[in-house]
Amino acid sequence: MIKIAIVGFGTVGQGVAEVLIEKKDYLERVVDKYKIVAVADSRGSITGDVDLFEALEIKRRRGKLPAGLSAEEIIENLDFDLLIETTITNVEDGEPGLTYIKKALNRGINVITSNKGPLVVAYRDLMRIAEKNDCRLLFEATVGGAMPVIKLVDKCLAGNRIIGIKGILNGTCNYILSRMEKEKMPFNQVLAEAQELKIAEADPSYDVDGIDAASKLVIIANALLDLDAKLSDVEVTGIREITPEAFEVAMEKGYTIRLVAEAGNEGLKVSPRLIPIHHPLSLQGTLNALQIKTDLAGDIVVMGKGAGKRETASAIISDFIDLYRN
Amino acid sequence: MIKIAIVGFGTVGQGVAEVLIEKKDYLERVVDKYKIVAVADSRGSITGDVDLFEALEIKRRRGKLPAGLSAEEIIENLDFDLLIETTITNVEDGEPGLTYIKKALNRGINVITSNKGPLVVAYRDLMRIAEKNDCRLLFEATVGGAMPVIKLVDKCLAGNRIIGIKGILNGTCNYILSRMEKEKMPFNQVLAEAQELKIAEADPSYDVDGIDAASKLVIIANALLDLDAKLSDVEVTGIREITPEAFEVAMEKGYTIRLVAEAGNEGLKVSPRLIPIHHPLSLQGTLNALQIKTDLAGDIVVMGKGAGKRETASAIISDFIDLYRN
């Protein structure tokens, strides 16, 4: 019996809960029986033998979980095997996720996270703590939602040396740029439209200034190129300055403009780049894509939805199966 | 110590041998010590404690291996753990690979193959034999060279139900069609050019009539959609009849034409299809791509080189690591 604590019960945590209910029969065949011993959000928790369906109902009705043990108390004291950590991303200091993950790993508890913050701030530290305590920290959901990246390289390209990576890692920027390309509209107008459609946040800077893409790049580069990079190691330029005229000039020559994140011999960089119109990274809409340059397999490209409730849950569930497949 | 027999010593077998030499230190850290106990081609073999470097030298110099045990004698009598089967593809009866693979599995020996024939002819049979004898048959190299497909779904999309697949599975056809698109040249002229460049064979029918794509589709559909399909279950139309005029009409409406292999609720089909110019399957050149429709992760697309010596070796090596990773 795998005992699971879910910490963070927003969109992602709820998505995971829904899939753990929906696919219980299938998952228990592939992994092992499991039960949820705690669900916590920033304001409260339910512990014991948690009925996920009921927890989702309460959260939906009240907007929060009832008063109870704090996430930290749960992680420090309860008896469980797996922490699913889906608290909100904070790339400045990684908190509160960083503390939660460290405490769990130090107790020898496996962790699956969708939270970029802790990994951007302390990737190597966390991996060392996991290794020392003979447990694992999995994080497929932090980079590109449903798009497989970390396990793709570890499992499917095993034996290959990764030479470099180049990707479209922010769906909001890609949406804005592909709309600018098609409609010949200025940045601010498309941004306003994206905000109305909830594709961009009210404060869009995390996306349009390239910080989200840079955060994912740090995690991917650390994992695939075996680096110890921090956010401050990435040279970042956002997309605010791109004009319809720039698109016009690019298009005339068979190119488009996309926000490209890349890592390789020349360091880590996020910037608007010219991409040939037929190149696999010349994506439309909110998709994400990653091109992986390898020594044997050549260039492998993967693309998929970079965000979304079920898509992110998919990445977490695939980590869950990877951890416990019998 | 993993004892390996390599049967089939053409381009693919030699590619594997080269990587087993080149990456020996790395591989022995990731899996276990290994040695080659037999290498066989259709005319001879070397057995014992095989020096792969020497075997490659002999093959290059003489065009064949020296007289020795036959592949069948090796598989029936020698003591080994893993058969790497890279003989020539024959989608009519699967031979000689089918017999080799069956004999090995019946002895409880793991098999990695790059040979579509046996899997097209007897997918379910082979899987049953492997299961009964508590060993495994891995075949990532049969579908799309270096492009990860089988393990991508098994490992990276674990937990997802696969609803359908749609792909560009033949690099020769894709090369011809993307040249016809660009140069507005007729089929026969582009085919002749492709033959000169060794992208198409002297007898191109296996590729341009869609049989190669259909064979890969059968294997992928059986593996990912849990079917028991045969080549005769695929509705196949090749690309010989496509005219420059058809491209002209398509392009005017923002489409191109590609040979698409698809499987889902409506059965298995390989046929030339209109693809929006910006669609991920609107590939250029000899690339392969597969779009996988899932219930959680949405649509995931992967693309890569569908053929090539090192690319196919990459898929075989990733299966090797999957089998024996310590």
Image (tube, coloured by chain):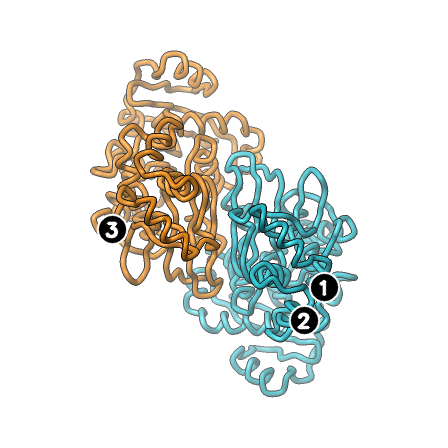
Chain colours: A cyan, B orange
CB within 8 Å, label 1 to label 2: yes
Q: Specify the amino acid type for callout 2.
A: Glu
Query: Which of B243/A202 is in front?
Result: B243
Element marked by disc 3: strand
| The label number, if any, that marks residue B234 in the structure image | 3
Whether labels 1 and 2 belong to a single chain: the reply is: yes
Q: Chain of mark 1?
A: A
Element marked by disc 1: helix
Q: Specify the amino acid type for callout 3.
A: Val
| The label number, if any, that marks residue A206 in the structure image | 1
The picture places residue B25, in percent across and down from the top left corner, at 57, 29
Whether labels 3 and 2 belong to a single chain: the reply is: no
Element marked by disc 2: loop
Whether labels 1 and 3 belong to a single chain: the reply is: no
Q: Is residue B204 left or right of residue A155?
A: left
The alpha-carbon separation of the residues under discs 3 and 2 comes to 47 Å
Q: Is residue B9 left or right of residue A128?
A: left
Give the quadrant of residue A248: bottom right
Q: Chain of mark 2?
A: A
Q: Specify the amino acid type for callout 1.
A: Tyr
Please tell me whether mark 3 or mark 2 is closer to you in this view: 2
The alpha-carbon separation of the residues under discs 1 and 2 comes to 9 Å
Query: Dot 3: within a 10 Å radius of its alpha carbon, few (fewer than 14), some, or many (20 or more) residues?
Result: many
Specify whether residue A19 is in view.
yes
Q: Chain of mark 3?
A: B
- Determine whether B144 is above or below A80 in the image: above
Query: Dot 2: within a 10 Å radius of its alpha carbon, few (fewer than 14), some, or many (20 or more) residues?
Result: some
* Residue labelled with disc 2: A201
The picture places residue A230, in percent across and down from the top left corner, at 75, 51
Identified at 68% across, 80% down, the residue is A44
